[in-house]
Image (tube, rainbow, N blue to C red):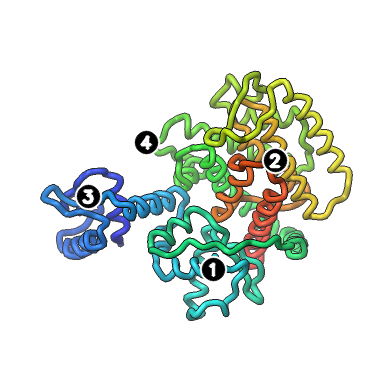
């Protein structure tokens, strides 16, 4: 059943006035359903989101309507049902949850069923980080989607002053649990790995400006269906990065270490749509788009810096390290690789792939960067003004926790 937000998205995509008969045809509505369609359209008019003129219905150009359009298009791009998210009571729940470092069931005056509905929805879309089930403890990381949602409903966007929290005991506990569950149910774990790859590929390439949505990414990679309206270059970028991710993760789980040549091979696989630079070191200066303050090594420094990084990597692997130290090294490796920036393009996506390899090589089943942590991750990497490996370590710790919790919940269901 079409909702008023479905009509709003349609009108926004048209960018012009649309009359009722055209809307009825688009949504395949029968004549007897006109009164309901009219009612929903008039709700949008009454809210000041849509204008009704002699030419038809058209989105009104206001700050609130633009905010709503950004919300729904972001949800579509990331496979989120915006009809569930656009709920004022859910937004009020989020506003309160973001004021707390951790929250529990008792922090909210909600019916148990409503509380369960909200946390399940947020966790499903990667917007909530579960700390423990009994007693229930969770947190909601700040991200632009939630900030826009709160603004749309006129709620204050206030974020708790996050303190440095020691997740080490919880991470170690969940990792031990994973190792037991994965052995007990290897086929289910393999299915989860396959299921996660399109989400990671979509999230990773969306940070690089690829416009293809998550639903279309799944079509391309899983169903081998290529929607005709997509650009060939964008499709190839997804397919090629899939090949690089699959190879890197297979290598990691086969206990094949990173080498300089292997990194070049991963980059070649990922960037085959740009054969002139694929797997080749750059010889020219480069910069991070939108962040001119990001420090990058000179082209002449690439090889010596990369060889030094690989020596440190080999030394690290020879020493038995606890999980926090492993995550700290993955954060350092990621940021140092981005500083070296060995390629003309594709450095950030390669850095993510290498950080995942380091973790998966050590038996940590990181499959994806959840949507709720994506903004934070970007701010700690290519978006930072000043490099802070400890901040990235904290973010990666939460990414690892999200993955472990999600996998363990699925394997034990």
Residue at x 52% of width, y 77% of height: 108
Q: Which of marks 3 and 1 is in front?
A: 1
Q: Is residue 184 visible?
A: no
Distance between mark 1 and mark 4 Cα atoms: 40 Å
Distance between mark 1 and mark 2 Cα atoms: 31 Å
| Depth check, front residue: 283 or 176 | 283
Q: Which of marks 1 and 2 is in front?
A: 1
Instruction: Point out residue 107 in the picture as x, y percentages from the top left corner.
Output: 56, 77
Distance between mark 3 and mark 4 Cα atoms: 24 Å
Q: Name the residue under label 2.
A: 334
Q: Quadrant of residue 276?
A: top right
Q: Which of marks 4 and 2 is in front?
A: 2
Q: Quadrant of residue 183?
A: bottom right
| Depth check, front residue: 403 or 46 | 46
Which disc number belongs to residue 97?
A: 1
Q: Nearer the viewer, mark 1 or mark 4?
A: 1
Secondary structure, mark 2, is helix
Q: Quadrant of residue 97?
A: bottom right
Q: Mark 4 points at which residue?
A: 229
Distance between mark 3 and mark 1 Cα atoms: 36 Å
Instruction: Point out residue 149 in the picture as x, y percentages from the top left corner.
Output: 43, 59
Secondary structure, mark 4, is loop
Which disc number belongs to residue 58?
A: 3
255 sits left or right of 193 in the view: right
Label 4 packing within 10 angstroms: few (<14), some (14-19), many (20+): few
197 sits left or right of 362 in the view: left
Label 1 close to label 4 by CB (< 8 Å): no
Instruction: Point out residue 233 in the picture as x, y percentages from the top left corner.
Output: 47, 29
Which disc number belongs to residue 169?
A: none
Q: Quadrant of the C terminus?
A: bottom right
């Amino acid at each position: 059943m079409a909702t008023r937000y479905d009509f709003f998205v349609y009108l926004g995509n048209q960018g012009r006035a649309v009359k009722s008969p055209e809307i009825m045809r688009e949504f395949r509505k029968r004549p007897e359903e006109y009164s309901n369609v009219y009612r929903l359209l008039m709700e949008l008019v009454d809210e000041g989101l849509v204008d009704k003129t002699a030419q038809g219905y058209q989105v009104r150009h206001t700050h609130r309507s633009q905010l709503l359009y950004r919300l729904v298009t972001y949800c579509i791009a990331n496979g989120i049902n915006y009809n569930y998210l656009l709920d004022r009571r859910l937004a009020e729940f989020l506003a309160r949850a973001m004021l707390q470092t951790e929250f529990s069931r008792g922090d909210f005056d909600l019916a148990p069923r409503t509380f369960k509905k909200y946390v399940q929805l947020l966790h499903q879309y990667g917007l909530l980080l579960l700390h423990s089930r009994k007693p229930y403890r969770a947190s909601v990381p700040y991200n632009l989607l939630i900030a826009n949602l709160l603004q749309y409903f006129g709620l204050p966007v206030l974020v708790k002053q996050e303190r440095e929290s020691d997740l080490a005991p919880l991470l170690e506990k969940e990792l031990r649990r994973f190792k037991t569950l994965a052995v007990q149910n290897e086929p289910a774990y393999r299915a989860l790995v396959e299921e996660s790859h399109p989400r990671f590929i979509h999230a990773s390439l969306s940070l690089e400006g690829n416009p293809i949505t998550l639903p279309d990414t799944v079509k391309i990679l899983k169903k081998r269906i290529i929607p005709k309206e997509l650009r060939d270059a964008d499709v190839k970028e997804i397919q090629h990065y899939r090949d690089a991710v699959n190879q890197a993760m297979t290598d990691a789980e086969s206990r094949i270490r990173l080498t300089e040549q292997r990194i070049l091979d991963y980059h070649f696989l990922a960037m085959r749509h740009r054969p002139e630079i694929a797997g080749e070191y750059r010889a020219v200066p480069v910069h991070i788009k939108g962040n001119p303050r990001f420090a990058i090594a000179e082209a002449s420094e690439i090889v010596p810096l990369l060889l030094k990084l690989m020596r440190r990597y080999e030394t690290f692997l020879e020493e038995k390290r606890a999980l926090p130290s492993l995550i700290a090294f993955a954060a350092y490796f990621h940021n140092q690789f981005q500083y070296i920036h060995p390629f003309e393009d594709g450095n950030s996506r390669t850095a993510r792939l290498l950080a995942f390899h380091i973790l998966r090589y050590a038996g940590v089943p990181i499959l994806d960067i959840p949507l709720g942590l994506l903004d934070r991750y970007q701010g700690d990497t290519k978006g930072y003004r000043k490099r802070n490996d400890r901040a990235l370590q904290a973010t990666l710790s939460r990414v690892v926790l999200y993955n472990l919790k999600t996998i363990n919940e699925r394997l034990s269901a």
